[in-house]
Image: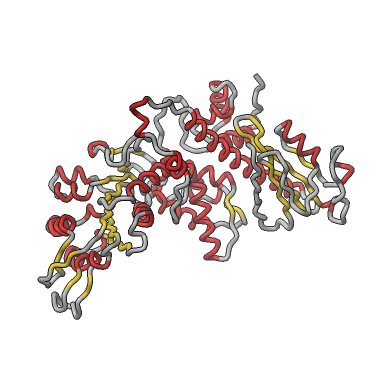
Amino acid sequence: MGCNIPWCVQVLPKMPRQSPSAWAGLKEPIRATASACPQGALDRVLTTAALYTIDPLLPENCPAGTDTSALGGPASNQLTFIAVPIVVESATAGMLSAELLQGGSSSFAESGIMLLRSIADQLGDFLQSYRSTVNDEREQPLPSNDDWTELPHADQVEADHNITVPGVVGRSPALRKLLREISMVAKSNATVLLRGETGSGKEVAAKAIHDLSSRAGRPFIKVNCAALPETILESELFGHEKGAFTGAISSRKGRFELADKGTLFLDEIGEISGPFQAKLLRALQQQEFEKVGGTHTIRVDVRIIAATNKNLEVAVSETQFRADLYYRLSVIPLLVPPLRERRDDIPLLAAGFLHSFNSENGRSLTFDSSALDVLTGCEFPGNIRELQSCVQRTATMAIGPSITSRDLACKSGGCFSARLWKNKQWQQMPQQSSTDEPHRVSGDALFQRVHLDHPSHATRSSNSQFTRSERIIDRETLIAALEKAGWVQAKAARLLKLTPGQIGYALRKHGVELKKL
């Protein structure tokens, strides 16, 4: 690491003063203006990778070589200095420190240590993920001479890592893959069929395609095909003339006409009836239609994006869905991954939902790391929509300033989603490999039926002997994984499908010391 990364620690409720400092590059450390950073203490943290505290922060308690000119004020005897290392793969990549002002409360100092450790663990996870991404790119084999023409340009590779879409939160590999596909698809006017489970964010993906396309400044019109009966849906899409039916007191434009030169998003396309499928097919093929009760043909320039959570291949084989309409819609099929394949995004999404809740309700709640661990281990069959409901419900019922694992309904047997999905069949989208092209998805592979007794405790298959149903693991499993991994923390994390930060939390929780080999 060769650059400085400033870090801001949010002031917790009832925390009068917290002056943060952070070093990631270890060159020209950034210091808070009013902070007196004991350099000797910081050097010790960086060399030993261990927690260091000075309580109280007085000149006589600081190690030799410390600049104590800013110390000795009337509040110095109430200051506690805390420094924690940022560890990446057993090496100290940086450190995080803060000065806490709280009249000598040991419990308060302990909470400050837990907070800084949690932030440092997350920083370590982020740095490790970044390094892994860079190393993976460096380890790609050089292409043969015949393959040079297919190599992306350097600016395109950089663009793939910097695709950002308003409203899209996350950095998981599954989401980054979808965003890369969206950026490619947005360049054309081809019809897109978004496949994915309910609540997985298909509408957000459709809006992203529109916003990244040349039609971004044009209308983006949405229609939920399942929410309207056939007669009303026809009028809603194509419009109607005055007197076309009872209640048609004036002529009205339909969604196709309103979306001219823009994008029309047809959600729940698998729910439309057989007779209406034929009418929709003509509008898609010819880009023309007549209003209900009208004779004048209207031509439009509309890009179609459709979405469904149904198995259209089965519907076609059972003659419930027209094959010609299926092929017309499925020009470019994209799979929107379920939330269980985006576990790294759950803390970010949960934090975003909690921020919205705080803004709307005048609260200042935060998440404890234990709560985020539990949320990250849940299956969420309702995907993002269910996670949002879970956060809002938990925040509403929370009593303290921080949401802990004890506040979550699933920890007390009150998760209604678990009751709903118990002993039910669950339709699951298969995960595309990273080499799959967006238009090469086999219809036979879609919507595999998976039996789950309880989605939040589903067993995941793996080449490893270690599986988990929650992020909190027992001491025996932790030690067994460390033994198998040669006491290398990062390898044990991969065996248990955890992050190194979560392994570190488990080590501290169970009091396990890493062996020096």
Query: Against 79, is 356 above or below?
Result: below
In the image, taking residue 495 as reference, residue 335 lies left or right, namely left
The single residue placed furthest to the bottom in the displayed view is 249
The N terminus is located in which quarter? top right
Q: Where residue 125 sits in the image (x, y, percent)?
A: 57, 38
Q: Where residue 463 sits in the image (x, y, percent)?
A: 42, 25
In this orientation, does residue 102 appear? no
Decide which of 277, 25 is in the foreground and name it. 25
Please give the count of numbered marks on the rendered protein.
0
Q: Quadrant of residue 514?
A: top right
Decide which of 514, 434 is in the foreground and name it. 434
In this orientation, does residue 494 appear? yes
In the image, taking residue 215 as reference, residue 86 lies left or right, namely right
The single residue placed furthest to the top in the displayed view is 517
Q: Where residue 114 sits in the image (x, y, percent)?
A: 66, 44
The C terminus is located in which quarter? top right
Query: Against 342, is 259 above or below?
Result: below
What residue lies at 20% left-to-right and 79% top-to-bottom? Answer: 250
What residue lies at 85% left-to-right and 44% top-to-bottom? Answer: 67
What residue lies at 26% left-to-right and 50% top-to-bottom? Answer: 190
Query: Against 194, is 242 above or below?
Result: below
Q: Where residue 240 sits in the image (x, y, percent)?
A: 17, 72
In the image, taking residue 483 as reference, residue 283 lies left or right, namely left
What residue lies at 25% left-to-right and 66% top-to-bottom? Answer: 255
Picture colour scheme: secondary structure
Q: Quadrant of residue 274?
A: bottom left
In the image, taking residue 382 as reference, residue 92 lies left or right, namely right
Q: Quadrant of residue 258?
A: bottom left
Decide which of 237, 454 is in the foreground and name it. 237
